[in-house]
Amino acid sequence: MTRFKPSLKNRLCLALLAALQAANIQAGVDRDLAYPAPDAEPDAAEIARQVYFANHFYAFDNFSIKRRGKTLSVLVNKSKGGSPISTAVERHLNNNYADGDAIRSRDLAIFHSGNLRGTGMLITEYKDDEKSKDYMVWLPRLRKIRRFAQPRHEDAWGGSVFTFGDVTLRKPDDETHELLGKKKMRSCLGMMEALEGKLFRFTGRVPERSCRQLDREVYGLKSTSKFKYWWYDYRISYVDTESFADYRTLYYKKDKLIKIIDRDWGLVNTEGEGDPRALFWKYWYGVDLRTGQESLAVIPRKVVDFNSDLKKSFWTERTLRKIKR
């Protein structure tokens, strides 16, 4: 059998195609990502990009989970057989940077209770995808700002089941994606039973498990990590076919289910107008099936704000230095 040997012209074309593909692989998701046309059938990679768009609130110039009187968002962690431990937190994300600006977004988190009380964290993400995020942390006891290297994807966010990869770091190109088809959601989302429907500090009454997703049509998206010897091999997400809200993500290692994250989403444009991806989180629930640890992030609707008139100077070191313990 004669082996096909491409001509010089073909080799140059193949090399150019490979370079373009590599450029696409390295490219991140930007705010100008268009919503799919009504008659389009997005492929797996496009669905992953749309999910990233929704989770990073790119439909908004800025997005805040702020403090309203005594009401705050709360992150609750509970070990198997243990008692819930909570941390109140506010978060402000700014996506409104000019095309020529090196910055893609800035994310400010301020902790209001627990061991992290008075701590602030400012994260800068750059448009250059080869550049790591910049982390500045305000340490209240020292009254100083320290710069830290970008955490690892697998590090726990606030000691929770949620990792930095789950919350912010993982990009669509960190995985390969496969579309498993469509189906309807047939079960309610998970919830920390110890707190379900009960009054809790900062949040008021903890919501009951959400069933609003029942019978919603979702994509099944299988995402396999490109990282070697990773803590999971692949994950399967149930993604709303209209809004691209990822309601549920199942993590597998050696084909064994090891972790579940459920997200209850709210729609900003309740009249059906505007970008369907203009969403906000109501709560996250996660459980590590290997350890039994549970985590719950509750975001009351009254603390959610978006497209506010905050100036860009709010997302600077000056705000960190003003944090009161």
Image (cartoon, rainbow, N blue to C red):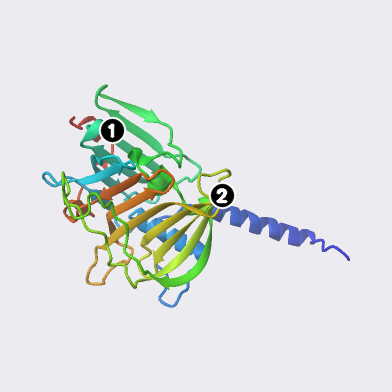
Q: Position of residue 13 (x, y in %)?
A: 70, 60
As rendered, which of 261 and 82 lies closer to the eye? Answer: 82
Image spot of residue 152 (x, y percent)? 46, 38
Q: Please identify the quadrant where the N terminus is shown.
A: bottom right
Q: Which mark is residue 253?
A: none
Q: Inspect the image, locate mark 1, and give the three-letter code of the amino acid beneath it.
A: Glu
Tell me the amino acid under the disc marked 2.
Lys
Task: State the SS at label 2.
Answer: loop
Residue that carries the numbered disc 1 in the rendered image: 317
Q: Quadrant of the C terminus?
A: top left
Q: In this view of the protein, which residue sits in the foreground, 68 or 128?
A: 68
Q: Of all residues shown, which one is farthest toward the left? A: 69
Taking the image as shown, residue 314 lies to the left or right of residue 247, namely left
**In which quarter of the view is residue 176 placed?**
bottom right
Q: Nearer the viewer, residue 143 or 192?
A: 192
* Residue at the far right in the pictured view: 1
Q: Which residue is drawn at the image coordinates 37% and 69% (left, top)?
A: 185
- Residue at 20% x, 50% y is 309
Residue at left 32%, top 31%?
A: 137
Q: Secondary structure at mark 1?
A: helix
- Give the percent coordinates (x, y) of residue 311: 23, 45
Q: Looking at the image, do the residues carrying marks 1 and 2 touch, with CB atoms under 8 Å apart?
A: no
Q: Which residue is mark 2?
A: 226
The answer to whether one can see residue 152 in this image is: yes
Give the crowd class for mark 2: few <14, some 14-19, many >=20 residues within 10 Å.
few
Q: Locate residue 38 relative to residue 74 in the image: left or right.
A: right
**How many numbered dots are placed on residues in this image?**
2
